[in-house]
Amino acid sequence: MSVQERHQAIVELLLTHGRVTVAELSARAGVSEMTTRRDLELLERDGLLQRVHGGAVSTVSGSYEPPFAVRMHQRADLKARIGVAAAALVGANETVVLDAGTTALATARALRGRRQLTVCALSVPATTELADESGIRLIAAGGDVRPGEQCFVGPLAERIFDELRFDTFVISVGGVDSGTGLTDFNPDDVRVKRAAIAASRRRVVVADSTKLGRVTFARIGPVQLADVLVTDDGADTELVAALRDAGVQVVLA
């Protein structure tokens, strides 16, 4: 395992079990216990866990959305594939809104090196990712920055969509359900998403397969708001069929 793969595995195990041991992690990764302790030290420094005697415990409550820093380590390989597939849907000369969230950030990374694009970023990480791209005209939505998530929220973030119109909105969500629709965790985020949806001609939802069939706290709107859903090939076939029956084009990365 690479360092990134080890860190991702540690975070995933903690989210599932709440506690891990050094011996267990070393055996899984095929590395020494000293290497595992260094991994835990780095992850603790980032606030992703708390070291205890013989191992580590999770610092994340199972009742709430995991923090952005934790989600960066979750299913990173799948998100990268989804980001590449979503970026492939964006043509030259398009105007694009990039949502906040880790999968939208993966899309931002996949857009690097492109030319003749205008991109409006709804988060600090996506803005930073594209800030030095000479072929991309970058617009930062502005507004209040929500701590932890580093996304733009509030009236200033929403107001830009009164003035501008876009070809494509790449939307990051907490859940995609054929009945309830598109949902997310934070109502402030949802208000910005709704404003961007109203200002965009096409809506591309990016979500890994764990979010299909899931319903979270704040409703964005019906699933038909999505023209395209880009997810991974681990998606449940019945859930994919239900979304296609609802009129959503599903792309499996």
Image (spheres, rainbow, N blue to C red):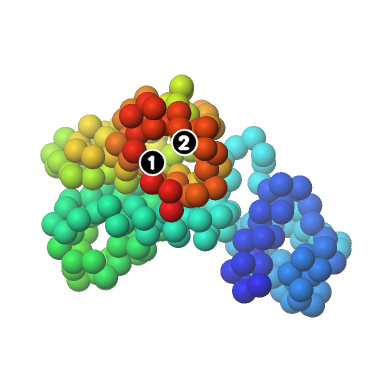
Q: Which mark is residue 117?
A: none
> In this rendering, does residue 151 appear at all?
no
Q: What separation in Å lies between label 1 and label 2 (alpha carbons)?
A: 7 Å
Q: Quadrant of the N terminus?
A: bottom right
Q: Is residue 106 above or below residue 64?
A: below
Q: Which residue is mark 1?
A: 250
> In this rendering, does residue 49 appear at all?
yes
Q: Residues within 10 Å of mark 1 (few under 14, many from 20)?
A: some
Q: Is residue 104 left or right of residue 67?
A: left
Q: Nearer the viewer, residue 235 or 205?
A: 235
Q: Amino acid at mark 1?
A: Val
Q: Nearer the viewer, residue 27 or 136?
A: 27
Q: Nearer the viewer, residue 69 or 204?
A: 204
Q: Quadrant of residue 193?
A: top left
Task: Identify the secondary structure beneath mark 2.
Answer: helix
Q: Is residue 17 left or right of residue 126?
A: right
Q: Amino acid at mark 2?
A: Val
Residue farthest toward the top in the current orientation of the protein? 179
At a point 20% along the width and 56% down the height, the residue shown is 91
At a point 52% along the width and 60% down the height, the residue shown is 77
Q: Is residue 202 left or right of residue 206?
A: left
Q: Position of residue 133 (x, y in %)?
A: 25, 69
Task: Identify the secondary structure beneath mark 1.
Answer: strand
Q: Position of residue 169 (x, y in %)?
A: 27, 44
Q: Position of residue 190 (x, y in %)?
A: 38, 33
Number of marks: 2
Q: Is residue 253 above or below residue 216?
A: below
1 or 2: tag closer to the N-terminus: 2
Residues at discs 1 and 2 in contact (Cβ within 8 Å): yes
Q: Which residue is mark 2?
A: 240
